[in-house]
């Protein structure tokens, strides 16, 4: 029995456990138990189940073939192959769930040595004053559904010296894009790491033994049958544009550069097929639209109206903001079933988003994600922010006016 037999079994168990947990919640409430306490216990049980499921999935699919000299460190929601010579990970593998955008945990910023690494653990003294960011391989935002997973993502065994411009710009945007793919494609397995080799420069401080990689990679695997697909990206460790199509490579090429045999537990035929792929159109069908929308010219909409480039000057204020709808999506999962309407630039480069939650869709005579797409509109409301991104929450159709 191959790993996909176990995946199918886990998916079945996953659905059954969600039903059992929901049943437990309803029964508990019917007997008059405190609703807050019941909800807390329910969410705790759900998180523990999810962690168990992810561990099994990584073990059955995500781990590479053994690497000489590595330390395999298994945490609650990710696994690190730690390189004690370079004092960085060879790779980090984690699972990105479909409901990642509905998570509530925030960054802990608790950077600290990994207690499970036996020797040559890097630490704060290695990075202090180096000019490099402590670049997450498995990003903390991918673990916002679990407090323990967010906390563990700040172990130095998950860090690589990363150019600040890359880490805070392009790499972050790539991580955001992959989260969008998780919603579209169900759960994804993500492998991230540096290209390690002899002779790499070292951070000049601390232990003087932490290697600075010249390149970083990220591999994305959609392992759900009947269609399996994968994509990989290779970026230089410097401040470069995102340009997805310019940085797409095959998994085979990453294996050649690293000497690592990824996904070696997959069926040989499936492994050979997905590791040769580098067709981004399977993931991103509108790259040309993204490029053209990123070059828009801000428009003056007249007195009393602002455009999307001005939103940051009006946070917390009631405004009328206008622009062209270049991206729209309705997501039928999570707590709030949100509709995202992006003006002028698409996710993850969005300047401004109109959010329509849950039952508020009933107040619209049309499907916003279909009717508004490619139209120039104006929306009235108070500008707030969510994870640093400006937004207006629309609850009624009359808040939005179509200009053309």
Image (tube, rainbow, N blue to C red):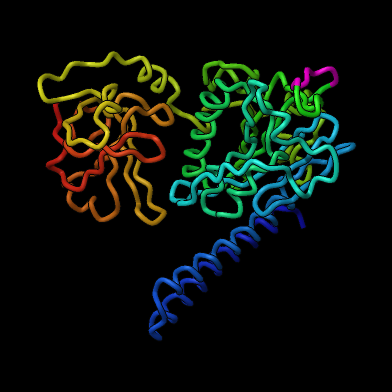
- Residue found at x 44% / y 81%: 28
| Residue 127 placement: quadrant | top right
The x, y position of residue 232, in whole percent, is 64, 29
Residue 199, relative to residue 333: is it above or below? above
Q: In this view, does 130 lie to the left or right of 72?
A: left
The x, y position of residue 177, in whole percent, is 49, 33
Residue nearer the viewer, 211 or 68: 211
Q: Please state the total of marks drawn on the protein image.
A: 0
Residue situated furthest left in the rendering: 303
**Residue 275 in view here:** no
Q: Is the magenta stretch mostly helix, strand or loop?
A: loop
Q: In which quadrant is the N terminus drawn?
A: bottom right
Residue nearer the viewer, 279 or 244: 244
The magenta stretch is 198-204
- Residue found at x 25% / y 37%: 316
Residue situated furthest right in the rendering: 68
The x, y position of residue 250, in whole percent, is 68, 26
Q: Is residue 51 left or right of residue 312?
A: right
The x, y position of residue 359, in whole percent, is 25, 56
Residue nearer the viewer, 155 or 185: 155
Q: Is residue 201 magenta?
A: yes
Residue nearer the viewer, 376 or 129: 129
Q: In this view, does 1 lie to the left or right of 133?
A: right
Q: Does the magenta stretch include residue 139?
A: no
| Residue 373 placement: quadrant | top left
- Residue found at x 66% / y 56%: 7
Residue 97, relative to residue 354: is it above or below? below
**Residue 165 in view here:** yes
């Amino acid at each position: 029995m191959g790993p996909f037999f176990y995946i199918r079994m886990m998916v079945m168990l996953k659905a059954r456990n969600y039903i059992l947990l929901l049943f437990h919640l309803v029964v508990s409430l019917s007997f008059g138990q405190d609703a807050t306490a019941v909800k807390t216990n329910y969410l705790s049980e759900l998180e523990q189940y999810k962690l168990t499921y992810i561990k099994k999935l990584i073990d059955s699919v995500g781990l590479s073939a053994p690497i000489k000299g590595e330390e395999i460190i298994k945490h609650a929601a990710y696994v690190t192959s730690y390189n004690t010579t370079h004092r960085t990970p060879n790779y980090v593998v984690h699972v990105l769930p479909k409901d990642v955008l509905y998570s509530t945990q925030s960054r802990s910023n608790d950077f600290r040595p990994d207690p499970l690494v036996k020797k040559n653990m890097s630490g704060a003294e290695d990075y202090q004053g180096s000019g490099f960011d402590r670049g997450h391989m498995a990003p903390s935002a991918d673990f916002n559904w679990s407090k323990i997973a967010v906390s563990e993502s700040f172990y130095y065994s998950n860090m690589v010296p990363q150019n600040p411009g890359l880490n805070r710009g392009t790499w972050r945007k790539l991580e955001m894009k992959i989260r969008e793919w998780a919603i579209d494609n169900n759960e994804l397995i993500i492998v991230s790491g540096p290209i390690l080799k002899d002779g790499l420069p070292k951070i000049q401080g601390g232990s003087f033994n932490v290697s600075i990689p010249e390149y970083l990679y990220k591999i994305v695997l959609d392992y759900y049958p009947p269609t399996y697909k994968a994509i990989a990206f290779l970026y230089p460790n410097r401040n470069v544009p995102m340009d997805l199509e310019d940085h797409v490579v095959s998994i085979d090429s990453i294996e050649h550069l690293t000497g690592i045999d990824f996904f070696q537990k997959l069926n040989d035929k499936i492994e050979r097929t997905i590791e040769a792929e580098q067709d981004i159109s399977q993931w991103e069908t509108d790259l040309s639209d993204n490029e053209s929308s990123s070059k828009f010219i801000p428009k003056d909409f007249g007195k009393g109206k602002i455009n999307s480039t001005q939103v940051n000057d009006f946070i917390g204020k009631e405004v009328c903001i206008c622009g062209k709808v270049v991206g729209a999506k309705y997501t039928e999962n999570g707590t709030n079933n949100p509709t995202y309407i992006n003006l002028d630039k698409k996710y993850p480069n969005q300047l401004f988003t109109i959010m329509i939650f849950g039952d508020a869709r009933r107040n619209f005579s049309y499907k916003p994600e279909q009717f508004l797409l490619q139209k120039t509109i104006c929306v009235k409301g108070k500008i707030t922010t969510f994870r640093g991104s400006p937004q207006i929450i629309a609850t009624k159709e009359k808040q939005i006016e179509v200009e053309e």
